[in-house]
Amino acid sequence: MKERFEGDAGRRLRLEVLAAQKMMLGNGPLVEEVANLCAVEEYAAGAELMQQESDTNDIYFVLAGTVQIVVNGHQVAVRGPGDSVGEMAAIQPTQKRSATVVAQTSIVVAKLTEPQFADIANRHPQLYRAIAQELSRRLMERNKLVGVHRDKIRVFIISSVEGLPIARAIQDAFEHDPFTCTVWTDGVFRVANYTMEALEAAVDDSDFAIAIAHADDVTAYRGQDWPSPRDNVILELGLFMGRLGRRRAILMEPRDEKVKLPSDMAGITTIPYRFEPGKDMAALLAPACNKLRDHFKAMGPNNG
């Protein structure tokens, strides 16, 4: 693919794509210099352009394809044509790389070494202004990934419609505790919202999730019928578990019913509860709520 950008035949396309770079700001002479000096390189999907904490300091302008920006093993952004990567190390050559950059697809980049970049930037100081603007934008983007520090614990309660009385009773039990407890019916799923988007927002705003494994359905397993929780309850618990971890995603199982759970639910934090229609629900749930209370206080808010 890089042949499209090489030599005299590829010069026109190289100039056209570089002119669209955010850092070039439509500066014709600057585009010409970068096009003349850069090395056009191609990387297969999965290849690394740079590693976090490495000492390299080349700068890359993405001409085609996309790259993933990975910090501490987590993808934080995707860059494509019009974007550049590696500017921070090019500006401060002694600074180690702040992220790993991996080709998400087959990519073509225009590479400048740090000395080449410094020489061009000395003649075109607008480059530094463009970089400052871009880094400011990226800092704002990165800040979105940093959760708000919380002093008060927030708990999200998942249940089926049939399990709502239990969910409400648990919410009531924590009325005088320093917790904010939200049951899934408390305005989380608005009519205009796609359910998964609303769930993701709830995950970001929660320190713990409680899923109530009420015996809602019947599952045939090895020739026998077993009571089982509603599928969406298990799905939602898995979503919270993936984001918050197993100790913060808690499954509540009915003590006196052998509810059939998926085999991959093994190893998560479980708390048994008692429920008998027509009896004092608060009293029956008190032991389970006491265990939940102790668990929440021991772990505290999920502030990283």
Image (cartoon, grey):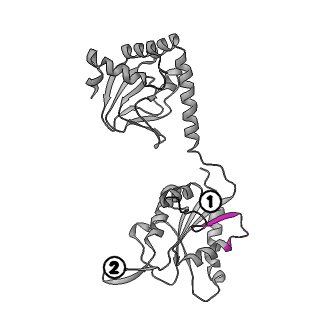
The magenta-colored residue range is 172-185
Give the answer, above or below, for where 263 lies relative to 92.
Answer: below
Who's the residue at 48% across and 30% down the image?
A: 97
Query: In terms of image quadrants, where is residue 298?
Result: bottom right
Query: In terms of image quadrants, where is residue 202?
Result: bottom right
> Which residue in the protein does label 2 denote?
221
Which circle marks residue 181 in the picture?
none
In this orientation, does residue 179 appear?
yes
In this orientation, does residue 93 appear?
no
Residue 275 x/y as whole percent: 57, 83
Residue kind at label 2, given as amino acid type: Tyr
Residue 133 x/y as whole percent: 57, 27
Dot 1 falls on a residue whose secondary structure is: helix
Give the answer, above or below, for where 140 lies relative to 234.
Answer: above
- In reply to whether residue 152 is colored magenta, the answer given is no
Residue kind at label 1, given as amino acid type: Met
> Which residue in the protein does label 1 denote?
299
Residue 244 x/y as whole percent: 53, 57
Who's the residue at 54% across and 23% down the image?
A: 130
